[in-house]
Amino acid sequence: MTDSTHDVQGQIAELWIYPVKSCAGIAVQQARLSRHGLEWDRHWMVVEPNGEFLTQRSHPRMALIRPEITADSLLLHFAGQPSLQIPLLAQGEKCRARVWSDTVQAWDLGEWAAAARAWLSQVLGTDCQLVRFDPAQPRQASERWVSSGQAPVHFADGYPLLVLSQSAVDELNQRLAQAGEAAVDARRFRPNIVIAGIEAHDEDRVEELEVLELPGLSLQPCKPCTRCPIPDIDPDTAVPGTSVGQSIGSYRQDPRVDGAITFGMNAIVLGLPEAAGASVQLVLGQQLAGNLRFD
């Protein structure tokens, strides 16, 4: 499907969910999309006993924890360890967890909490546990970038989706090659949606990205994604480096966020009813189209 009325046209090349915040992602062929983002994305989070969240920034080995979603379970895999299996809807007592400056209500895992705590503490070498988001207690994205109530979010850093153009990764790899460094893939940036067929960083410049097969639905890039050291952590080995951060730092200083380094765009979902459970299906190959924004 093509539409010559739009400035930018591409297609969904990759879909990723990250069931446990800061652990490895799962590439999927299709995924349910709600106003919260993709189904099961950042639905669980590893926290310290006081509820403070853990990420690869301080615990790079989280990159090697591989989640798997089955019909009724969350499985966590780690080389050399028996896999951990937890029912998808496991919940025990209400608890509090902290994501950056947000303190949110969550659920511990009830009768499965002790097993999850032992498994994660063994893998990561620190006392930690797993909590599940409580959808009855909505968390909202920053009103600096979106209207109040427009973007409910689970345990993601701040927004329901992260979109990234494949050509932006290709351009980065050209720069890495010129510097004698190894190529990387989109996993370094933990996107939910990788878009093929558009120019590098066109996601920065469009007003909205309409999903042409789903009339009325669009993704609105709303905030540049500022970058921390995680893109320098090899997702296959968990070994930190410096080449990615140094490279994007040389050309991606973004005046929209006071000169911070950005790569990819946070996005919200428009066109879905606000009713709980409203969703649509995103599928690889669906066409995206938008018009350039001129600020």
Image (cartoon, rainbow, N blue to C red):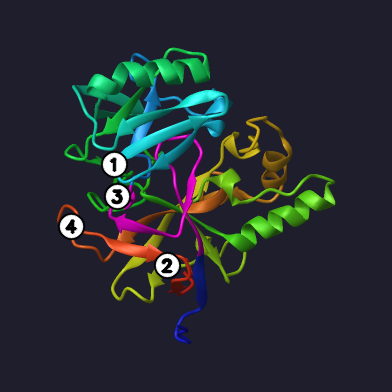
Marking on residue 179:
none
- 159 vs 83: above or below: below
Number of marks in picture: 4
Instruction: Name which residue lies at 35% across and 67% down.
Output: 218
**Magenta highlight on residue 20:** yes
- The first of marks 3 and 2 along the sequence is 3
- The first of marks 2 and 1 along the sequence is 1
Q: Which SS class for mark 3? A: loop
Which residue is outermost to the front? 82
Q: Which residue is mark 3?
A: 36
Q: Which residue is mark 2?
A: 207
- Tell us which disc is closer to us: 3 or 2: 3
Q: Which residue is mark 4?
A: 274
Region of the chain picked out in magenta, as a range:
13-39
Q: Which SS class for mark 4? A: loop
Instruction: Name which residue lies at 43% across and 42% down.
Output: 18
What's the distance in space between the residues labelled 2 and 4, CA to CA?
21 Å
- Tell us which disc is closer to us: 2 or 1: 1
- The image quarter in which residue 44 lies: top left
What's the distance in space between the residues labelled 4 and 3, CA to CA?
11 Å
Crowding around mark 4 (Cα neighbors within 10 Å: few <14, some 14 to 19, many 20+) is few
- The first of marks 4 and 1 along the sequence is 1
Residue 251: x percent and y percent?
A: 69, 51
Q: Is residue 261 visible?
A: no
Q: Which residue is mark 1?
A: 72
Residue 275: x percent and y percent?
A: 14, 56
Q: Is residue 230 visible?
A: yes
What's the distance in space between the residues labelled 1 and 3, CA to CA?
21 Å
